[in-house]
Amino acid sequence: MDTIDQATTVCLDCGQSFLYEPLLIGSHDFGKTLHPRCQDCEDAFARAEREREETARRAAAEAAIVATLPPDLIETDTSHPEFNAALWRAMSAWRPTADARWLGIIGRAGACKTRCMTLYAARVIRYGLRISWLTAGRLYDIAAEYRHHDDKIRTLAREAFEDAKSAPYLFLDDLGKAEWSTAFEARLFQLLDHRKAYKLPVIYSSNVHPRAFEICISDSNREPLIGRLLDRTTIIQL
C-alpha cells in the first residue's frame, strides 16, 4: 500500500478543486474514492444526513403513536378548561426511580386519567422507547383467548401478552373495570410479577384504590396482586 503526500480532485457537490490524501492500493487510488467532497460540502452532507435520520425517526415515532394509542385521545388539548392540568403537571414531573418504578393514577371517572396517560405514553415513544398499551378489558380478552382452540386467536393473544410483559413501558388503563375471572387474575399476576422482578416501569389507572379490589380477587391472589400494585409505586390520588 502506497500513499502520496497530497493530490487534488473535484468536489462531487460544488465542483471546486480541493486537496486530499491519496491512498494507493495497486493502481487504484482509494483516497479519491473515500473523499468525494471538499470539507465544507462533506460537513453539509453530514448535517443533511443527520437531519434526514432525525426526520425519519420522528415520522416513525408519530406512526407508532397513532398505531398504539387511543385515536380520540392523541390530540388532547391541554389548554382546554376541562382538562386536568394539575394531574398532567404531576405526571409530567414523575420519572421511574429505584424506589418507585411504577405510577398509579387513582380517581373518579372523567378526571382525565386516560388522557394524561396517553400524553405521557406519546412522550415515551418520542424518546425512542417501545410501549405496550392495555386496557383491563383487553387484558381480560387476552386471558380468555390465551388457551383458545383456534391457533390464530391463541397466538395473537400470547404475542400481545408477551409484548406487555417485556415492553420498556406498560400502560394499563382502567384497572378494576374487567371481570376478575380466574384466567384474568392469573395473567394479571404473571404480568405484574414479571415486570416487578425485571424492574420494568408500569403506569396504571383505576377509579378506586387497589385495596378496593379485595372483595373481587380470590383468596390466593388477593394479597400478591394488591401488594405488587402498591409496592414501590407512586400513587397520585385525585
Image (tube, helix red, strand yellow):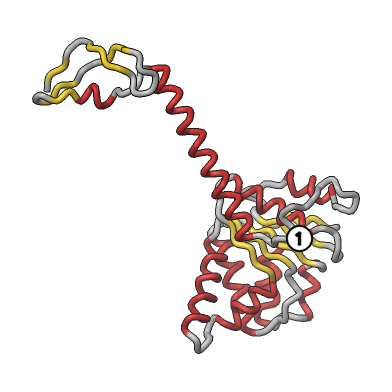
Q: Position of residue 220 (x, y in %)?
A: 65, 81
Which quadrant: the N terminus?
A: top left
Q: Residue at x 61, y 73 (%)?
A: 189
The type of residue carrying mark 1 is: Thr
Name the residue at the left extreme.
26
- Residues 81 and 191: in front is 81
Q: Position of residue 126 (x, y in %)?
A: 61, 46
Q: Which picture quadrant has residue 187?
A: bottom right
Residue 222's place in the image compared with 117, above or below, is: below
Which quadrant: the C terminus?
A: bottom right
Q: Secondary structure at mark 1?
A: helix
Q: Position of residue 93 (x, y in %)?
A: 74, 44
Residue 207's place in the image compared with 19, above or below, is: below
Residue 114's place in the image compared with 84, above or below, is: below
Relative placement, left or right, of 154 versus 133 is left
How packed is label 1: few (under 14 Cα within 10 Å), some, or many (20 or more)?
A: many
Name the residue at the right extreme.
81
- Residues 52 and 207: in front is 52
Relative placement, left or right, of 176 versus 79 is left
Picture mark count? 1
Relative placement, left or right, of 62 versus 88 is left
- Residues 150 and 113: in front is 150
The residue tagged 1 is 114
Q: Residue at x 59, y 57 (%)?
A: 131
Name the residue at the front extreme.
15
- Residues 130 and 33: in front is 33
Q: Position of residue 213 (x, y in %)?
A: 77, 75
Q: Which picture quadrant has residue 30?
A: top left
Q: Which picture quadrant has residue 180?
A: bottom right
